[in-house]
């Protein structure tokens, strides 16, 4: 009985990522766009097309991304022999500047013992640094409902995977990575009412920005605070984000080419998934359910279906030629792995300008982690499992292998 159930689940997991509508035309990211003629050289891509597309994503999709450069960074050692003496745990209090917000961004940094320089993974967490990373770290002012009780947290782990709240810190440290985790909820709460009231929105005008843009700017603030740390190798900093934070991580790296690599797990609509092809969450659905993630103007563009030729493969193309890993789950039809695979394929044309093949795997089920764009589908549903992290670390090992000290 049990085996039949388990077989059924595995079978559905394998069968379900689906395919995109046959015959769907995907505009090449190199073809003419907004009056800019077709691109055939990397220099034209970098000089002309990158700024044009960056502006298009800000004005047509995500809204104003606040200025990220930190005003000041205070450091405090929480434990010089954390994780059984293998790591050092520090708290960075990052002042974002009054035009952005008085509320500082708390970032927990775990670095392997030793001098480095270490590659670094920057990520956001869902419930707060005290509960997700270490109880000695500060508790947030606000957390989402499901994070407030032990039961809520346990149910979240059950429904969304063993690593949804806590990344496997020890494994990361053992494999030589430093990890920086920030909690976005105090600065830009994931709540429609609190978000609109948050100080970070007053500068831009809350109608003109959205939570994804703000979270993207927090990734970049953490990046700026950490890239000058002598223990960190600045060319080997990766952004990691799951789902809504995967969307933010992709946007942040698309806006700043100093970011070394991106791992976006099940980032879905307005992440790595083509809006024009998805059979999962539509653009109208996401804007209706999560209005605070986007500027007000997006609601009318999606109902009029007028994204003016802009789609998410162009966001992935902005990452070229940097390494990108797209994690997917077979049962997660909502984020539509097939429409994300199609985006990765279309973005690869731009990687070609830089002498990289981009995505080389022949199908969603045959990942090639050595390629600059890699894609995998694991069994099961939406969430983060330890296995997602081992794939992510395997991917980074291959792309950061020439790093100092490796
Ligand atoms: C919802 C939303 C998705 C998002 C996801 C998440 O399901 O519709 O777009 O990616 O939440 O962040 O977990």
Image (cartoon, rainbow, N blue to C red):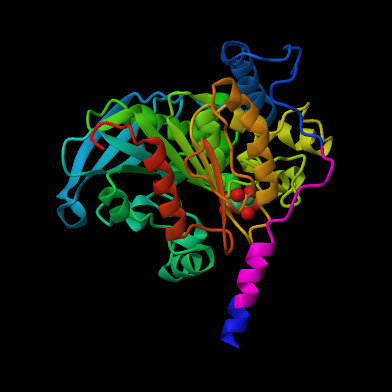
Kindly give the residue lying farthest to the bottom in the view shown. 1
State whether residue 27 appears in this view.
yes
Q: In the image, 283: left or right of 11?
A: right
Q: In the image, 216: left or right of 129?
A: right
Which residue sits at x=59%, y=44%? 361
- The residue closer to the viewer here, 21 or 287, is 21
- Which span of residues is magenta-colored? 7-24
Residue 252 position within the rendered picture, expressed as x and y whole percent measured from the top left:
51, 31
Q: In the image, 141: left or right of 265?
A: left
Whether 7 is drawn above or below 403: the answer is below
Whether 219 is drawn above or below 352: the answer is below
Q: In the image, 106: left or right of 277?
A: left
Quadrant of image for the C terminus: top left
- The residue closer to the viewer here, 53 or 291, is 53
Residue 306 position within the rendered picture, expressed as x and y whole percent measured from the top left:
81, 31
Residue 93 position within the rendered picture, expressed as x and y whole percent measured from the top left:
30, 36
Residue 289 position within the rendered picture, expressed as x and y whole percent measured from the top left:
69, 50
């Amino acid at each position: 009985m049990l085996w039949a159930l388990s077989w059924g689940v595995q079978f559905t997991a394998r069968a379900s990522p689906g395919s995109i509508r046959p015959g769907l035309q995907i505009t090449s990211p190199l073809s003419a766009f907004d009056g800019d003629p077709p691109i055939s050289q990397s220099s034209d891509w970098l000089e002309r097309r990158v700024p044009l597309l960056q502006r298009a994503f800000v004005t047509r999709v995500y809204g104003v991304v606040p200025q990220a450069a930190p005003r000041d960074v205070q450091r405090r050692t929480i434990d010089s022999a954390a994780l059984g003496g293998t790591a050092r745990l520090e708290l960075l209090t990052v002042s974002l500047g009054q035009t952005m917000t008085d509320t500082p961004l708390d970032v927990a940094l775990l670095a392997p013992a030793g001098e480095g320089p270490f590659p670094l993974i920057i990520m956001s967490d869902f419930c707060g640094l005290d509960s997700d990373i270490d109880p000695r770290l500060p508790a947030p002012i606000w957390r989402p409902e499901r994070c407030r009780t032990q039961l809520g947290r346990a149910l979240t782990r059950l429904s969304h995977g063993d690593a949804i709240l806590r990344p496997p810190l020890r494994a990361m440290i053992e494999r030589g990575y430093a990890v920086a985790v920030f909690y976005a909820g105090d600065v830009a709460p994931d709540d429609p009412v609190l978000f609109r009231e948050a100080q970070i929105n007053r500068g831009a005008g809350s109608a003109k920005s959205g939570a994804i843009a703000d979270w993207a700017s927090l990734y970049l603030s953490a990046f700026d605070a950490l890239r000058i740390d002598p223990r960190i190798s600045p060319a080997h900093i990766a952004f990691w984000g799951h789902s809504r934070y995967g969307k933010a991580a992709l946007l942040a790296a698309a806006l700043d080419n100093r970011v070394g690599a991106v791992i976006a797990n099940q980032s879905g609509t307005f992440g790595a998934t083509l809006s024009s092809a998805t059979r999962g969450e539509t653009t109208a659905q996401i804007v209706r359910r999560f209005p605070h993630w986007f500027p007000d103007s997006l609601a009318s563009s999606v109902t009029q279906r007028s994204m003016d030729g802009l789609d998410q493969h162009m966001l992935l193309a902005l990452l070229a030629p940097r390494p990108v890993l797209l994690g997917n789950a077979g049962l997660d039809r909502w984020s539509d792995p097939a429409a994300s695979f199609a985006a990765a394929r279309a973005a690869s044309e731009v990687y070609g300008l830089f002498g990289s093949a981009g995505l080389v795997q022949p199908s969603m089920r045959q990942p090639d982690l050595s390629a600059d764009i890699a894609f995998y589908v694991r069994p099961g549903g939406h969430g983060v499992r330890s296995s997602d992290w081992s794939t992510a670390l395997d991917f980074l090992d291959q792309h950061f292998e020439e790093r100092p000290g490796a």
